[in-house]
Image (cartoon, rainbow, N blue to C red):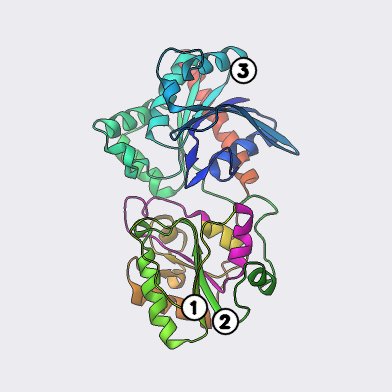
Amino acid sequence: MRILVISKRQYTNLDLIDDRFGRLRELPLALAKSGNEVTGICLNYRSRDEGRRDDVTKDALVAWYTLNIKRLLPGGSISYWRTIDTIGRDFRPDLVWACSDAVHAILGVRIAKRLKTSLVIDLYDNFESFPVTKIPGMIQAFRRALRRADGITCVSHPLAQYVRETSLCKCPIKVIENAVPEGVFYPMDRTNSRRELGLPQDGVFIGTAGAISKSRGIETLFKAFEILAQENSNLHLVLAGVCDKGVNIPQHPRLHYLGMLPTNVVPIFLSTLNVSVICNRESDFGKYCFPQKFYESVACGIPVVSAGTGSMLELFKDKTEILFEPEKADHLAMVLRRQINKPVVCTLEAPSWNMLGIRLYEFFQSCIKLYLDSSHK
């Protein structure tokens, strides 16, 4: 199968080409490892270098073409649409997988029609909560694109249900959650991990890695830490990730903010913790996302406490003792206290991207068949 992936280049505070991280990098590679040919085009919403950038591993290759967003405009020797036409002629894709935001879902419809091929749209979050959908008419155009797709992949079951209800699409929807790369996230020695990051050797560490953001309810964790720190002089809070403007990280001798860590250091960070905390709010984002850090923490063997929203609420409907009510610091403190005193490690197996790549390939096969059947009518 020949698959064309279209995506924006910068997502989840990282760069698809430079940082080589996340769903939109790992799933195309997983598809390539299964014997498929995969080519991608990613748009730079912020001006970056352009051209072909091959993502090569020992058993896979994905050829990425990166272009600045101005290339969408007609004219010039280099244009987005000329690149699309060249790929259509030389690569002849069987399917377009449109990822990353509402803009690319809309572009996907036009590209699939231009190349006379099937279209699957991927939703790694609720794109309707993204700033770009504030543009007048964008949500309507996005939902129209979903109705025209031959298939949709969603990161969570709540999101799949929401998409079905709001877009009125008739095509099949497949839930493809997030996963972990093989051989990267696994249990590590806590003492060595703390030493490597320059953290104290002694103490009980709670923490989170990811967006330090009000939109994720990070202030609930700050307040819960203040409650528990008064009870336990051995408790530390460790944070890593991009801190949004307007977030004031409390000044406390046992609060450690490590900033944005390289992706290969995240497993070491998680391994310093006694309990990993996944913050979220009951918002248009929180209700439909699938937290990447959940499976990363599980793969590292770290006990987890999570906000009871969306996919986490569904996943642990029979094991609610690790969930806390979003934005309720007292309840988070209670759940943390329980996990610290009697830690419970989640027994779920963290899937690998390669496992999800096989499921994605099988779904693509069914979508191509639907497209061919409908085009022959």
Which one is in front, 296 or 375? 296
Q: Amino acid at mark 2?
A: Gly
Where is residue 276? Give x, y as percent: 52, 68
Kindly identify the amino acid type of the residue bearing the numbered disc 1. Answer: Arg
Q: Secondary structure at mark 2?
A: loop
Q: Is residue 266 left or right of residue 291?
A: right
Q: Name the residue at 58% across, 20% down.
A: 93
Q: Which residue is mark 3?
A: 91
| Viewer-side residue, 348 vs 226 | 226
Crowding at dot 1, Cα within 10 Å, few <14 / some 14-19 / many 20+, comes out as: some
Is residue 145 shown left or right of residue 27? left
Instruction: Give yes or no for contact between labels 2 and 1 (Cβ–Cβ under 8 Å).
Output: yes
Q: Residue at x 40, y 64 (%)?
A: 307
Q: Is residue 67 above or below residue 315?
A: above
Q: Which element is circle 3 on?
A: loop
Q: Which mark is residue 254?
A: 1
- Label located before the other in sequence (2 or 1): 2
Q: Secondary structure at mark 1?
A: loop
| Viewer-nearest of discs 1 and 3 | 1
The residue segment tinted magenta is: 263-292
- Front residue of 221 and 168: 221
- Tell me residue 40's x, y (percent): 56, 28
Query: Mark 2, residues whose alpha carbon is within 10 Å: few (<14), some, or many (≥20)?
Result: some
Instruction: Please name whichever residue, 145 or 293, is drawn nearer the observer in this view of the structure.
Output: 293
Q: Going by the image, does 325 lie left or right of 75?
A: left
210 over 150 or under it: above or below:
below
Magenta segment includes 173:
no
Q: Earlier in the sequence, mark 2 or mark 3?
A: 3
Residue 84 in view, yes or no: yes
